[in-house]
C-alpha cells in the first residue's frame, strides 16, 4: 500500500516536470513572444485630436466652430536625428514651448502630440486642425449650443443631436513601446482616422456673409426683435437674427437674465397689426379682382357693435379705393371690407399663405400662428381685418405670406439644405411650391405694396438704389410695461421691386427701448444685400 502511494506521487511529479519543460520550450522557441515578455513590450495609444459634428452654412463654411489651432503628431522614429534640431526650432516658433523641450522629446524616442498656432509638415510629422466653440453670438439662435457633455441643448444642435453625435470624429496613433514608453523601431506607428478630416455634417441654407451683414446692422439698430431674410423663390432662409443674443461658448451668465436672450424671436408669435392687411387684400382680390376699385368713405372711424374704431388719420381719408387704403393703412376701409364680404375668406387665405400651417421648420420648433376659430363675432372680425385681437404671427410666417403675395406661390421655409454622412447626401424633403394667387391678384398686391413704400406709410424705405415693396404695422400687444402698453412695430417686404429676389421681415419688439423704426432697418438690409 505504501509503495503504491509512492509510485503515484512519483508519477504526478514527473508529469508536472514534463508540462513545465514543454512550456519553457514553447517560450524559448517563439522569439517575438519571449521578447515581448522579457522587455515589457506593449501597445500604446495617443489621442491626437477630437471634434464634435460639423454644422456648415450653404457655402460649406463652419457656423459654430472655429479652427484657430493645430494638433501636431511627432514620431521621432520616422525622422532622421539630424533633423531634430531644425524641427525643434520650427515647432517653437509656432507654439508656446521652447526648442529645447521638443529636442528632448525627440531624443526620448517617444511619439508625442503638441499644439501649434499654424500648420506644419515634414518627415515624421502629421498635422490636424483643432476645432473649438468660438467666443461669439453668431447665429446663436439657429445653431444653438451643447452642454459640457457635448449633448445639444437648443437649436440645430438639439434637434439633430443624434445625427451630430454620430458625426463626432477623432484621430489617434498606436505604436509598440517598451516598459519606458520608448518606441520600438521594428514596429511601425499606425494612425487611426475615422473621418476626422471629412466635411460631413449638416449644411444649412444660411449664407454666413449675409448673416454677418444683418447681424452687424441689428447690433446698433435693434435692441429687441428679429430680422428674417429668405430667397423669395425657394423659401430658403438666408439670414435669421433675433435680439438680444447670447454667447454660445459661455451661456451661464444668461441663464438668470430676464431679457429672454434664449428666445428666438424670429420664430416666436406676435400680434401682426397692419402687415396682416396683405392677407386681407389677397383674400378678397382673389375672390373678385374688381374689388381693387371698391370705394369707401373714411370719416376717421367705423362703428362696430356700438364701439368706435378709429383711423390713424383722425379727420379720415375721405373717399378712397383699396390701393390708397392699403398704402395709407386705413383701418375703417379694411374693417368694412371684412364685415361686408366675410371674415371666413380671410382666415382661409391666411392658412393657404402659410399662417398656422406648421410647428416646425426642418425639425426646429416654431410658434404656430394663431387665427380666430369657431363662431367669430363682429368685433373679432373687425380686429382680424387689421391684424389685432386673437391673431399671432411669427416673423418667419409673415415673411412666408410676403413671399406668396409677391410671387403667387406658397413655399415652405427651408433651413436645412442637406445632411452629409460618409459621402452620402440626404436633402430635406420639402413640399413643391403651390400656386395660391392668380397673376392678376399678384400684380394688384405688388402695386399696392410698392405704393405703400413710394407714397404711403412705408416712405422710410424709399431709396434710389433699391426699389422695394412692403407694408408697415404698429400693433398693440395688450402687454403693459411701466404703465404703458407695449407696441410692436413691423415692416415686411421684398426687393428689388421689378424682379423680387429677397423677402425680408423686420420686427421691433416693443420691450426694447432703443429700437430703430423697422422700415429703416429694412432699408439698410436691402441696400447692403443689393450691393
Image (spheres, rainbow, N blue to C red):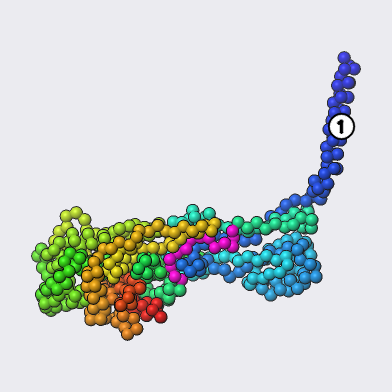
Image spot of residue 202 (x, y percent): 48, 61
- What residue is at 79 percent from the left and 65 percent from the top? 107
Q: Is residue 349 left or right of residue 265?
A: left
Closer to the camera in the image, 207 or 14: 207
Q: What kind of secondary structure does the magenta stretch mostly adopt?
A: loop
User: Which residue is situated farthest in the right direction here?
Assistant: 3
In the image, residue 217 lies in the stretch drawn in magenta: no
CA neighbours of label 1 inside 10 A, class few (<14), some (14 to 19), many (20+): few
Which stretch is magenta?
A: 195-208
Residue 283 visible in this rendered orientation of the protein: yes
Residue 205 located within the stretch drawn in magenta = yes
At numbered mark 1, what does the secondary structure look like: helix, strand or loop? helix
> In the image, residue 282 lies at what x, y percent?
22, 67
Residue 408 is situated, as x and y percent measured from the top left of the image, at 27, 67
Q: Residue at x 71, y 54 (%)?
A: 44
Residue, disc 1: 17
Amino acid at each position: 500500500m505504501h509503495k503504491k502511494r509512492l509510485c503515484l506521487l512519483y508519477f504526478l511529479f514527473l508529469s508536472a516536470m514534463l508540462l513545465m519543460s514543454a512550456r519553457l520550450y514553447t517560450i524559448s522557441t517563439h522569439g517575438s513572444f519571449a521578447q515581448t515578455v522579457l522587455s515589457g513590450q506593449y501597445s500604446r495609444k495617443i489621442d491626437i485630436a477630437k471634434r464634435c459634428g460639423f454644422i456648415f452654412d450653404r457655402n460649406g463654411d463652419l457656423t459654430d466652430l472655429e479652427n484657430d489651432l493645430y494638433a501636431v503628431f511627432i514620431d521621432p522614429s520616422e525622422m532622421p536625428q539630424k533633423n531634430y534640431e531644425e524641427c525643434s526650432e520650427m515647432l517653437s516658433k509656432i507654439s508656446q514651448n521652447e526648442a529645447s523641450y521638443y529636442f528632448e522629446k525627440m531624443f526620448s524616442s517617444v511619439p508625442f502630440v503638441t499644439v501649434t498656432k499654424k500648420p506644419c509638415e515634414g518627415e515624421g510629422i502629421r498635422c490636424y486642425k483643432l476645432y473649438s466653440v468660438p467666443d461669439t453670438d453668431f447665429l446663436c439662435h439657429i445653431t444653438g449650443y451643447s452642454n459640457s457633455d457635448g449633448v445639444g441643448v437648443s437649436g440645430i444642435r438639439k434637434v439633430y443631436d443624434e445625427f451630430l453625435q454620430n458625426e463626432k470624429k477623432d484621430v489617434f496613433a498606436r505604436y509598440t513601446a517598451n516598459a519606458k514608453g520608448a518606441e520600438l523601431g521594428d514596429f511601425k506607428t499606425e494612425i487611426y482616422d475615422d473621418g476626422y478630416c471629412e466635411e460631413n455634417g449638416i449644411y444649412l441654407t444660411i449664407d454666413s456673409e449675409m448673416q454677418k451683414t444683418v447681424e452687424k446692422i441689428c447690433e446698433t439698430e435693434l435692441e429687441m426683435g428679429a430680422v428674417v431674410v429668405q430667397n423669395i423663390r425657394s423659401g430658403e432662409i438666408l439670414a435669421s437674427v433675433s435680439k438680444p443674443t447670447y454667447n454660445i461658448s459661455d451661456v451661464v451668465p444668461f441663464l438668470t437674465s430676464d431679457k429672454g436672450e434664449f428666445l428666438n424671436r424670429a420664430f416666436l408669435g406676435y400680434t401682426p397689426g397692419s402687415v396682416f392687411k396683405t392677407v386681407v387684400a389677397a383674400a378678397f382680390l382673389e375672390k373678385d379682382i374688381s374689388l381693387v376699385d371698391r370705394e369707401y368713405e373714411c370719416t376717421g372711424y367705423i362703428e362696430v357693435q356700438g364701439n368706435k374704431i378709429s383711423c390713424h388719420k383722425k379727420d379720415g381719408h375721405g373717399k378712397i379705393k383699396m390701393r390708397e387704403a392699403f398704402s395709407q393703412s386705413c383701418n375703417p376701409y379694411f374693417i368694412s371690407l371684412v364685415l361686408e364680404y366675410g371674415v371666413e375668406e380671410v382666415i382661409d387665405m391666411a392658412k393657404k399663405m402659410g399662417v398656422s400651417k406648421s410647428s416646425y421648420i426642418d425639425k426646429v420648433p416654431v410658434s404656430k400662428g394663431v387665427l380666430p376659430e369657431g363662431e367669430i363675432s363682429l368685433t373679432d372680425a373687425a380686429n382680424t381685418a387689421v391684424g389685432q385681437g386673437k391673431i399671432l404671427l411669427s416673423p418667419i410666417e409673415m415673411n412666408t405670406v410676403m413671399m406668396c403675395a409677391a410671387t403667387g406661390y406658397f413655399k415652405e421655409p427651408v433651413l436645412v439644405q442637406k445632411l452629409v454622412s460618409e459621402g452620402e447626401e440626404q436633402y430635406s424633403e420639402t413640399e413643391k411650391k403651390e400656386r395660391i394667387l392668380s397673376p392678376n391678384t399678384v400684380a394688384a398686391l405688388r402695386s399696392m405694396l410698392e405704393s405703400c413704400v413710394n407714397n404711403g406709410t412705408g416712405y422710410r424705405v424709399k431709396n434710389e438704389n433699391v426699389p422695394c415693396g412692403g407694408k408697415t404695422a404698429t400693433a398693440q400687444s395688450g402687454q403693459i410695461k411701466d404703465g404703458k402698453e407695449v407696441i410692436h412695430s413691423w415692416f415686411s417686404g421684398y426687393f428689388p421691386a421689378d424682379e423680387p429676389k429677397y423677402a425680408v421681415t423686420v420686427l421691433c419688439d416693443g420691450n426694447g427701448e432703443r429700437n430703430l423704426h423697422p422700415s429703416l432697418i429694412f432699408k439698410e438690409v436691402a441696400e447692403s444685400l443689393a450691393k
